[in-house]
Image (tube, helix red, strand yellow):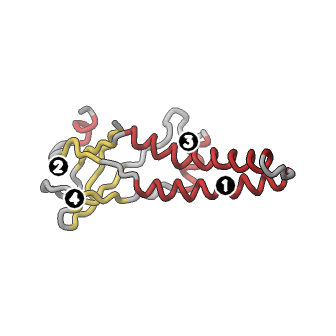
Amino acid sequence: MIEQTLTVSELKGNTAWLVSEQKPACEGCNGKCGSQVFSKLFGTHKKAFPISISQKLSVGQKVKLALDDSKVVQHALWVYLLPLIMAFIGMFSALLIFSLPELGQIGFAAGFAIFGFWIAKIKGQTLKHEVKVIKIYPISLPVTQIDGD
């Protein structure tokens, strides 16, 4: 399970908009490594994540969510591996079945990879991630108590 503590930024009916705290990639080099440079260069804008919660919440309250990591791996396999496999199928079919030269093999590989991306996009829309609320922290707790939990 992948767990993350988020902060309630907005409430609309029974939908809470949650924002995660951005953490630097590493803190060992004090901003001298490539990760820190890219983080400063491109910025870290926060995105709100909507979730339906039946419990009473208030803005600023912390909520711990969990995501089943097997679904994340399955989704990654569809998105990354399928287009690559389809590109190899296109390349080998162009070579073995049609005996095309290298430029034709590249074209077939690109066409099959795009077809693989299209299939992965359709399949990705049908995969649903089940997000579970593990804990809702009271708003009166200091952050140090939440992190030690």
The part of the image, by quadrant, that contains residue 48 is bottom left
Residue designated by label 2: 139
Which residue is label 4 attached to? 59
Q: Nearer the viewer, mark 3 or mark 1?
A: 1
Residue at mark 1: 112
11, above or below 105, in the image: below
Residue 65 at x, y percent in the picture:
28, 45
Q: Are marks 4 and 1 in contact (CB under 8 Å)?
A: no
Q: Residue at x 65, y 53 (%)?
A: 113
Between marks 2 and 1 in the image, the one whose residue lies nearer the viewer = 1
Residue 29 lies left or right of residue 113; in this view the side is: left
- Residue at x 25%, y 45% (from the top left corner): 132
* Kind of element beneath mark 2: loop
Q: Which numbered mark, 3 or 4, is in the foreground of this view?
A: 4
Distance from label 4 to label 1 (Cα)? 48 Å
Image position of 3 with respect to 124: above or below = above
Residue at numbered disc 3: 31
